[in-house]
Amino acid sequence: MKTLATFVLVLTGCLIPMQPAAQQPPGGYQGQPTSGGGGGDPNGPGPASPSSPMAGGSPSTQSAPSAPQPSSVVSVTVRSECGQTVKVFYGEKPKYGSGTNSSISSHSQENHSFRPGDMMWIIDDSENGVASVTVRAGMHEIDISGGCTTLSAR
């Protein structure tokens, strides 16, 4: 446990003395012992003060944002009915955006993990987009047509 000394905060050239925070007794308990009629342990849990950890933490922790929730993952089977290898792009803008170029072999299938809102494209030899699909939650299949130029999702 660290001891807090009086701190001085400097704001635009003015000195403002700050009072030390109350020290926490051993065991982490900050509430006041209960009095009368309870017959409970005076060192046991009592009513929590607003700044105690039992009441939700200090003001600095009450205003802290909660941790972001992990993004959901959509596992999709990509099937190709095309008779040749198809060039694909995983990302927002083929040729000009960040993402990943890849290919899918003829008459094959592979599993791919996406986040909702991710895009998959069929691209030509110059990396221009030919067809695209935007992944959404609940999607489980993306099919490349036998003509090799269209995508369908379900």
Image (spheres, rainbow, N blue to C red):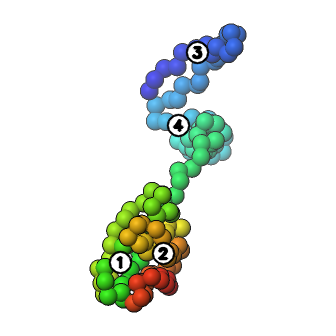
User: Which residue does the image show at 33% across and 72% down from the upper left?
Assistant: 103
Upstream in sequence: badge 2 or badge 1: 1
Q: Residue furthest front?
A: 126
Q: Give whichever of 4, 93 is nearer the camera.
A: 93
Looking at the rendered image, the disc whose residue lies closer to the viewer, 4 or 3, is 3
Separation of residues labelled 2 and 1 (CA atoms): 11 Å
Query: In what element is the residue under mark 2?
Result: strand
Assign a secondary structure to mark 1.
Answer: strand
Estimate the x, y position of residue 144 in percent, counting from the top left: 41, 84
Q: Nearer the observer, disc 4 or disc 1?
A: 1
Residue 41 visible? The answer is no
Could you say whether the residue bearing mark 3 is in a helix, strand or loop? strand
Name the residue beneath numbered marker 3: 7
In whole angstroms, how far apart are the C-alphas of marks 4 and 3? 24 Å
Mark nearer the viewer, 2 or 4: 2
Cα distance between the residues tagged 3 and 2: 64 Å
Residue indicated by mark 1: 86
> Are the residues at dot 2 and dot 4 in contact (C-beta closer than 8 Å)?
no
Q: Nearer the viewer, residue 57 or 135?
A: 135
Query: CA–CA distance between discs 2 and 4?
Result: 65 Å
Q: Earlier in the sequence, mark 2 or mark 4?
A: 4
In the picture of the structure, the residue carrying the numbered disc 4 is: 29
